[in-house]
Image (cartoon, helix red, strand yellow):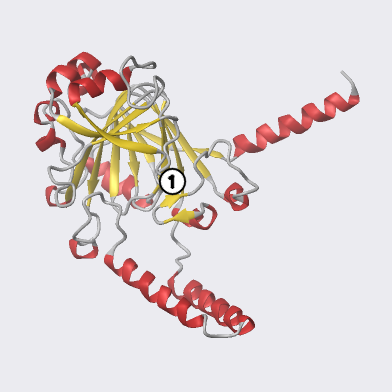
Amino acid sequence: MSYQCKCIFVVILDAIMEHEQHKIPLQEFTNVNKNKFLQEIYPMRKPVVLKGLDLGVCKSRWTVDYLSKTGGDQEVKIHVSEVPQMDFIKKNFMYRTLPFDQFVHRAAENKHKEYFISEDEKYYLRSLGEDPRKDVADIGRQFPRLAADIQIPQFFDEEQFFSSVFRISSPGLQLWTHYDVMDNLLIQVTSKKRVVLFSPRDAPYLYLAGDKSEVLDVDNPDLEKYPLFSQARRYECLLEAGDVLFIPALWFHNTVAEEFGVGVNVFWKHLPSGCYDKTDTYGNKDPTAASRASQILDRALKTLEELPEEYKDFYARKMVLRIQSKAYSSNFE
């Protein structure tokens, strides 16, 4: 091998190693009960993988045929995309309605004989309440026969419960990076799902548009367009069937269904109920105090526009310093 080839090889290897070093594996805990979760795991405010929990018979029962027959022909609203990477900001998907039993069979296919866009299209179900503008998703109400198969870990008090979201994904489907404002458990019932997470502290590097990141491809990001993204610390796990991922509020997450997969997200209110937006049925609207602060900031920034450029720059920097000194927490990870 020539010297030049060796140099190129070393550069490529170094790049691969550097990329791998940025992947921080999540801690795993086995056979966790409520007491251990609340006393040892929950206070860390970090995502962890919980293994060996009793989830009921869903793990063995929820085959394509069983889901189809048990869920029946009730209509469900689904996302349909021509590409595996769904982008909620640019809306590169369409909403369509299908009977649940038909949807399940389509979602499990790699190639479709019947389709909306193309034979390679991808499907995603995020279950909704009866009236999505007023009602939260609750698998016990929308899919009661299937709900009887799953035993949701009771790591929170009953009055804290917010929603239980039934999710089904086509093989290879990737969902956009986003955060939720409530704590939740992602129960991976069947197949495997890769989850990439980022700390709330890394928000400055994620190019946010609301609660979502503009960086769609977290594996091969466009660093010319998003140069700061390389500074974000990447946490990662591969969920196996039966695993449960605890995702604390405000932690960003991006998921890829390695295969046709079924899961259930359970959200609960860990803050006093009055903190949350009463119109929020998805668990992703910012708390009311945060929304008010954002509106006040918008007005302040608009007021700064009245100043000449050098004054605007100076007083904006002073505002940032005040926010850093008054609002940032040195203890929060």
| Residue linked to disc 1 | 90
- The amino acid at mark 1 is Lys
SS at circle 1: loop
Q: Nearer the viewer, residue 48 or 8?
A: 8
Q: Is residue 318 left or right of residue 46?
A: right
Q: Residue at x 15, y 36 (%)?
A: 139
Q: Nearer the viewer, residue 159 or 50?
A: 159
Q: Residue at x 42, y 25 (%)?
A: 172
- The quarter of the displayed image where residue 86 is located: top left
Q: Split into 4 quadrants, where in the image is the N terminus?
A: top right
Can residue 328 be seen here? The reply is: yes
Relative to 329, residue 79 above or below: above
| Mark 1 crowdedness (10 Å alpha carbons): few <14, some 14-19, many ≥20 | few
Q: Is residue 159 left or right of residue 32?
A: left
Q: Residue at x 52, y 74 (%)?
A: 320
Q: Is residue 151 left or right of residue 114?
A: left
Residue 81 point in image, percent of width and height: 38, 32
Residue 186 point in image, percent of width and height: 30, 37
Can residue 253 be seen here? The reply is: no
Residue 298 point in image, percent of width and height: 42, 73
Q: How many marks?
A: 1
Residue 213 point in image, percent of width and height: 46, 49
Relative to 235, residue 203 above or below: below
Relative to 132, residue 238 above or below: above
Q: Is residue 88 left or right of residue 37?
A: right
Q: Nearer the viewer, residue 172 or 308?
A: 308
- The quarter of the displayed image where residue 221 is located: top right
Q: Which residue occupies the extreme front position in the image?
A: 117
Q: Split into 4 quadrants, where in the image is the C terminus?
A: bottom left
